[in-house]
Image (tube, rainbow, N blue to C red):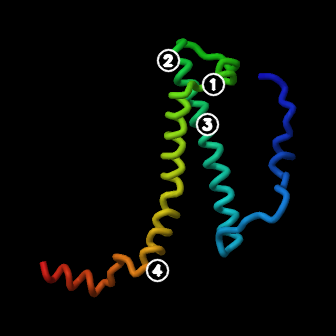
Amino acid sequence: MGEMNVDYIADAGRKAKGKRPQFFELAESERIMGILMAVVEELAVTRERLDTVERLLESTGKLDRSAIDAFHPDAAQARERGLMNQEYIARVMRILQQEREALEETLSGGPEKTLDEVSAQLGET
């Protein structure tokens, strides 16, 4: 492995310019979500690299770091990876999506029923 000329510690400490958007009421929730999304991003990169390793092994039967680093997926492979990433992000964000949908249903007077309504309905069947 060659010498690395990137200071990852310094890069990690850099701050974006401007005010950072806040999506949650509590700062702690923001921090946890930020950490989670950083881990999600790292795992997504790892998944793409693993996909590259698998494709190279399948096509050439051997591996070397330069081939992995130089790999560029063709259009079909890129679409497949894009779909894989969309599915991954959807699974990670599922809980937030479900909470948002439940809130929208509640605000719109949607199908949420009280315990008494469900009990009455079960008693009728």
Q: Residues within 10 Å of mark 4 (few under 14, many from 20)?
A: few
Q: Identify the residue position indicated by label 3 in the image.
A: 46
Residue shown at 21%/85% (left/top)? 120
Q: Amino acid at mark 4?
A: Leu
For discs 1 and 2, the disc positioned in front in the rendered view: 1
Q: Amino acid at mark 1?
A: His
Q: Amino acid at mark 3?
A: Thr
Q: Residues within 10 Å of mark 3 (few under 14, many from 20)?
A: few
Q: Amino acid at mark 2?
A: Glu
Most foreground residue, 28 or 52: 52
For the C terminus, the image quarter is: bottom left
For the N terminus, the image quarter is: top right
Residue 18 image position (x, y, % from top left): 83, 62
Residue shown at 67%/51% (left/top)? 38
- Alpha-carbon distance for marks 1 and 4? 47 Å
Q: Identify the residue position indicated by label 1 in the image.
A: 72
Image-based side of 50 in relation to 124, left or right: right
* Lower position in the chain sequence, tag 2 or tag 3: 3
In this picture, is 109 found above or below 74? below
In this picture, is 79 found above or below 74? below
Residue 93 image position (x, y, % from top left): 53, 57
Image-based side of 4 in relation to 123, left or right: right
